[in-house]
Amino acid sequence: DGGITQSPKYLFRKEGQNVTLSCEQNLNHDAMYWYRQDPGQGLRLIYYSQIVNDFQKGDIAEGYSVSREKKESFPLTVTSAQKNPTAFYLCASSFDLMGQPWAGYTFGSGTRLTVV
Amino acid sequence: AQSVSQHNHHVILSEAASLELGCNYSYGGTVNLFWYVQSPGQGLQLLLKYFSGDTLVQGIKGFEAEFKRSQSSFNLRKPSVHWSDAAEYFCAVSLNDYKLSFGAGTTVTVRA
């Protein structure tokens, strides 16, 4: 079945460490997105990519980095510069059909990152 | 500033009661509107979306939403809730740029 796979489901990080969250999709979607979710704040956009080898900062990109070397994959690295990384991270993807009605996102099941 | 507002942070209702969740946005111009639902510890699932045409849209699980341009609103409704509808609900807006901006979410609790 087509979908988005995020791994791991739970991740623990020590202070000062970088960690990478995986996001893979087999939907042949063009665009991929990373959101951070905190209680009572909804979802905030970290980074997005509309095409391979290109990505843009979202609203809260500081302390995060991404790469888009393959259409199917959009990993997110949470660096030691991110001061408050404990959160639920959601990856999403969508078609990028210019001029066509847009179907919105398909979401992965998320990764919960905790700093210990 | 452009924003999406969900004024009810937590709604508690009894099974079989009717549900209405409010969503207002402050973007100008043409918008695309979405409602998503999230079960605890899971990703978001699309309930319904509006692009154009009939302002009353039907979604999955018996949900519907009505777009009112004059009020910049897109409220979600369900005539009779089931215990399985307990979840968090997010309204989202797109400005035809393939990015979604989300409201803060509304948690729905259903009492037996």
Image (cartoon, helix red, strand yellow):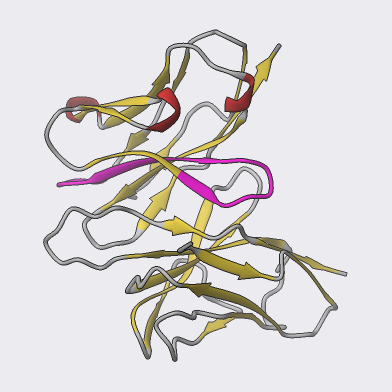
Please tell me which residue lies in front, A18 or A94.
Answer: A94
Q: On the rendered structure, is A54 left or right of A62?
A: left
The residue positioned farthest toward the right in the image shown? A116
Q: How many labels were placed on the picture?
A: 0
Residue depicted at 80% across the width and 84% down the height: A16
Q: Is residue B40 magenta?
A: yes
Q: On the rendered structure, is B56 left or right of B34?
A: left
Q: Is residue B19 above or below residue B61?
A: above
Q: Position of residue B23 (x, y in %)?
A: 39, 31
Q: On the rendered structure, is A15 left or right of A60?
A: right
Q: Is residue B59 above or below residue B12?
A: below
Asked where in the image residue A85 lies, by quadrant, the reply is bottom right
Q: Position of residue A1 (x, y in %)?
A: 48, 62
Q: Position of residue B11 (x, y in %)?
A: 59, 21
Q: Is residue A16 magenta?
A: no
Asked where in the image residue A100 lies, by quadrant, the reply is bottom left
Residue depicted at 44% across the width and 79% down the height: A72
The residue positioned farthest toward the front in the image shown? A1
Q: Is residue A6 above or below residue A40?
A: below
Q: Quadrant of the C terminus of chain A?
A: bottom right
Q: On the rendered structure, is B49 left or right of B35?
A: left
Residue depicted at 67% across the width and 83% down the height: A79
Q: Which residues are magenta?
A: B27-45
Q: Position of residue B102 (x, y in %)?
A: 44, 48
Residue depicted at 32% across the width and 74% down the height: A30
Please tell me which residue lies in front, A103 or B26.
Answer: A103
